[in-house]
Image (cartoon, rainbow, N blue to C red):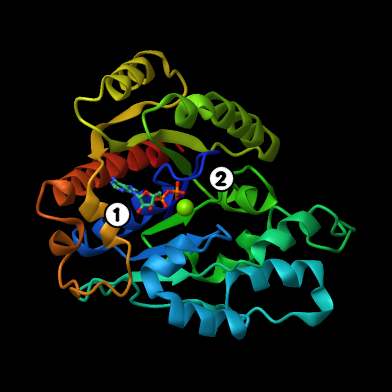
Amino acid sequence: MAIIISFINLKGGVGKTTTAVAVAEMLSGVFDRKVLVIDLDPQTNATLMLIGEEKWENLNENHHTIAQLFLDAIYPNYSKFNLKKTLQHQVSNVRDLINLDLLPSSLDLINIQDRLGTISTGRFYAANPINILRRGIKSIIDQYDYILIDCPPNLGIVTLNGLRISHGYIIPTIPDILSTYGIPQITKTLGDFSETIAETIHPLGIVISQYHPGMSLHDRVIKDLRRYSKDARVFETQIPHKQQIAEAVEFDHPNKFTTLRQKWGYGGQFEKYLNLTKEIRIAASQVLKSK
Ligand SMILES: Nc1ncnc2c1ncn2[C@@H]1O[C@H](COP(=O)(O)OP(=O)(O)O)[C@@H](O)[C@H]1O
Ligand SMILES: [Mg+2]
């Protein structure tokens, strides 16, 4: 059974995509799991990181993105979504990764988001605009050990589609005031959402990202988060702010990456993402056991 985890924060630029992709690569490359990344963000950053711009443009022109799945729900008579052609295998700019797949995103998701609220929920229409993703990928879920969902920075219908199928969610954040401000709102809203759909979506934890060691503001915010965050604990591993992490996201990096260690960097970053992934695996397995 696939463990499904969403990466969410209402703030952009806090490391959601980088963390989701790094963890997906660790699960696949180090832990030898079968992993699927679903990119639900119209900014398509996870998609660009994992398949590059050229391939993405080609898929997008041919409607082979997750946006088409949602468009089909709005215009059911023109169904075009083709799961097999949309699903990309062996993605990532690390040569040795073989068990990482991607459902790519599209800029078109921005417009679709607004229209989803207006679709018919008539008796025979499989009911609900938050179940579109679930129905669309049902047939492949069991092929994976982990499915990681990169969410846009909002709690709109597209995001709720991802959360709907998730066992848990992770909140990446920069340890500063504005990036952490919305965290109680996320845990509260998702607690309410869990109740509405009668299925628990567990807060697995908060990931400290882009951390500047020695910056007193960061240390203070982390201390407060660890002390006062009731609904979501803070993972022990803190991801530092490092140039090599920002560079690793480039798909066509001039030095082609052979290994994950080479990609994420020898200055301890590889170990940080590895340790974070270990923590996430433990948190996720505890959640599944409680089911
Ligand atoms: N640990 C890090 N050190 C340095 N730069 C980082 C780190 N994590 C992310 N970045 C960079 O910060 C920017 C925002 O990160 P990203 O993962 O895209 O955030 P989000 O998905 O929340 O918008 C990107 O340019 C990314 O390359
Ligand atoms: Mg992002």
Which quarter of the picture shows residue 10? top right
Q: Which mark is residue 246?
A: 1
Q: Is residue 61 above or below residue 6?
A: below
Between disc 2 and disc 1, whose residue precedes?
A: 2
Is residue 78 found left or right of 80 in the rendered image? right
Q: Residue at x 77, y 55 (%)?
A: 114
Q: Residues within 10 Å of mark 1 (few under 14, many from 20)?
A: few
Which quarter of the picture shows residue 173? top left
Looking at the picture, which amino acid does disc 2 mark? Answer: Pro
Q: Which mark is residue 153?
A: 2
Q: Position of residue 286 (x, y in %)?
A: 35, 36
Total marks drawn?
Answer: 2
Give the CA distance from mark 2 to mark 1.
19 Å
Q: Residue at x 59, y 26 (%)?
A: 188
Residue positioned most to the left: 266
Looking at the picture, which amino acid does disc 1 mark? Answer: Ala
- Disc 1 residue: CB within 8 Å of ligand 1: yes
Q: Position of residue 165 (x, y in %)?
A: 56, 51
Q: Position of residue 122 (x, y in %)?
A: 90, 58
Q: Is residue 109 above or below residue 98?
A: above
Q: Residue at x 43, y 62 (%)?
A: 46
- Disc 2 residue: CB within 8 Å of ligand 1: yes
